[in-house]
Image (spheres, rainbow, N blue to C red):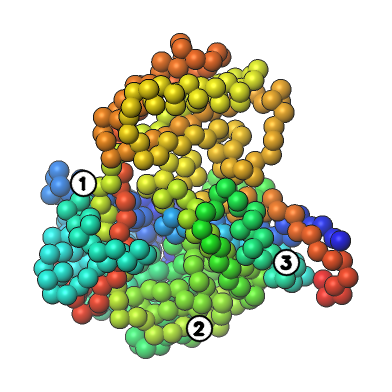
Amino acid sequence: MRKIKLIEIAHGRSGDKGDAANVGIIAYDDNGYKIIEKYLTAEKVKKHFEGICFGKVERFELPNLRALNFLLHNTLGGGGTVSLKHDAQGKTLAAALLRMELEFENNNPEI
Amino acid sequence: MKEKIKIASGQGFWGDLIDAPYHQVTKGDIDYLVMDYLAEVTMSILQKQKNKNPELGYAKDIPELMKKILPIIKDKNIKVITNGGGVNPVACANAVLQAAKNLGIKNLKIGVVLGDNIKDNLDELILEGAELKNMESNEPIELVKDKILSANVYFGAFPIVEALEKGADIIITGRTTDTGLTLAPMIYEFGWKNTDYNLLSAGTVAGHILECGAQSSGGNFLGDWQSIPNMAEIGFPVAEAYPNGDVIITKHPNTGGRISFETVAEQLLYEIGDPKSYITPDCIADFTSIKLQDMGNDKVKVYDVKGFPETQFYKVSCSYADGFSAVSSLTYSWPQALSKAKAADEILRKRLANLNLQFDEIRTEFVGYNSTHGPLAKELDEDEINEIVLRIGVRSHDYSSVERFGKEIAPLILTGPPSVTGFAGGRPKPSEVVAYWPALIDKKFVKPIITIMEL
C-alpha cells in the first residue's frame, strides 16, 4: 500500500452555492491528476466530511485543468446569510479536504 | 475591428480594495475597467437603504471613486462597466454625473441598464403566468411573497452591449451577471453574434476569472501561498482578449501577486457546480473544455473554450426576511481553555432551556479548535492550548428569544468558568435573517431597458 497526503499533490479552492459547498481540487502535475482521478472518489469525500456534509456528494472531472470539482450538498447550515457557521461560505473546506490521506496499491505502473 | 482589447478587473465585491480600480487605470494601458459590486446579500441591503431614502440603493463607493478616476478615463479613453447601480442605477448615474460636473468634465455619456428589478411587479408577473417557484425545492412563491425584500433578474452581457452601441462611456447596471460585465466589451468590439456560443463562452470564462478580483492573481491562493510576491501591492487581473476568443490573463507590471496556471485554475474552480454546464443568460459555457497555457511572466493563455446555446430563462434572485439571529463570543485562556469554553456553553444552554426560549438553531463552535474543520479538527492536548474563543449563535423566528439570548452572554463572565475575556461592544442585538429564493423566469416576461444619461 502507498499512502499519499492529498496536500502534497494538490491544491484547491472552495466556496458556497446556496446550502451546498463546492470544493475544487487541482493536482500539481499529470501524475497527481491520475491519482486523484482514480482514488479521490465521491464516496471517500463523503466519508471524509462526515459530520460536516449532510447531503450527497457529486464529483465532476476537469482533466484539462488536472482538477476535480466536488459539490457537497446540505453542508453550510442553511447557506450564506442564514447560516450560523463561522465559515458560512465554506471557504476553508478545500483546505479541510487536503487533510485527507489517500491509500492505494503501489503496483500501478502508470502513477 | 480592434486587434485586441484589454479589460481590467477593478473590484471583486463591494468592500474590496478601494484603490484597486485607480491602480488598474494608472499602472498600465487598458480599454475597459469592469467592477462587480453585487453579492446576493448586497441587493437586500441596498433595497433597505432605498426604502429609507429613495436617492440611495447603489454602491456609494462609486461616485467617490469616479471623482478620482474620471479625468484619467476621459484622457485615456477607458470605458467603465459596473453592476454597482444595485437597486437604483439612475441615482448612481446622477451621482456620477454630478461628480463629473464638479470636475468640469464635458461630454460624458452614462448608459443605464434597468428592468432587472421586479420587486414591485411580482403580482403582475405571477398573474401573467410567471411561476417563480423555488428552483431548488419547487415550493410556490406564495410561501414567501409577503416577506420579500428584493427581487432581481440576472441580465447578461447584451444590455451592456446595447449601451456601448449607443456611445456610453460608463455603464451602470442593476443585477447583471458578473461574467456579463467582461463579456460585453468583447461582443461589442469584435462583433460577436448572439449565436457565437464558443466565443460567448470564451468571454464568459474570462469574466469568471476576473469577477473575484485578485483571487486569480495570487490572492487566497491555497497552493504555495508563501511564495506569492508582494501581496501588499497585489495587481488585479487584466484580460487581453482577441477576436478569435483567445484570452491572455495578465496583470500590470510592477505589481504584486502572480498569474500562473495554478492561480487561474483555482479561480476557475471557484463556486462552480457541474463544469460542463455553467449557465448564464448569454450561453452555457463548458468549463471542461477550457485549456490553459502558462506563458510565464504572469501571463496565462485561456483558449479552446466551447459552449452551447443559452436557456430560455433568466435566473431570479429574491431575498426575504426569515426571522432573527445573533452571534456572540467569549475568550477563555490557559489552563484548560477548551474545557472552560465547553463548560460555559453547557451552562448557557441550560439557562436558555430554563427560560423556555424558542430557537430554530443554537450553534456552538470553538475558534482555535474546530470552527473551520469541525470533526476533522485534530484532537488537542489541552495543556498546549493557549486560548479558545467560544462562539455561539442562535436563530429564531421569535425576536424576543434572540434578544434574551443577547442578555445571557455577559453574565457568564461573573457566573461561569474563570479567566474569560473578550466581551466587548455590548449585548449582541438580533439582526434580521435574509434568506434567498432562487427562481427562473421565462425571458419573455422581462425586458432590459437601456437609457443614456449625459452631460
10 Å crowding of disc 2: few (<14), some (14-19), many (20+)? many
Kindly state the secondary structure of the residue where label 2 is placed. strand
Residue B278 screen position, x and y as percent:
45, 73
Q: Quadrant of the rendered structure where residue B137 is? A: bottom left
Residue B6 screen position, x and y as percent:
45, 71
Question: For the residue marked with disc 2, what is the amino acid?
Answer: Lys
Asked if residue B411 can be seen in this view, the reply is yes
Q: Which residue is mark 3?
A: A39
Tell me the CA gap for discs 2 and 3: 28 Å
Q: Which residue is mark 2?
A: B306
Same-subunit check for callouts 2 and 1 = yes
Q: Which residue is mark 1?
A: B48
- Taking depth in this image into account, of B217 and B395 the one nearest to the observer is B395
Q: Is residue B359 left or right of residue B318?
A: right
Q: What residue is rendered at 37% in x and 59% in y?
A: B36
Q: What residue is rendered at 51% in x and 77% in y?
A: B276
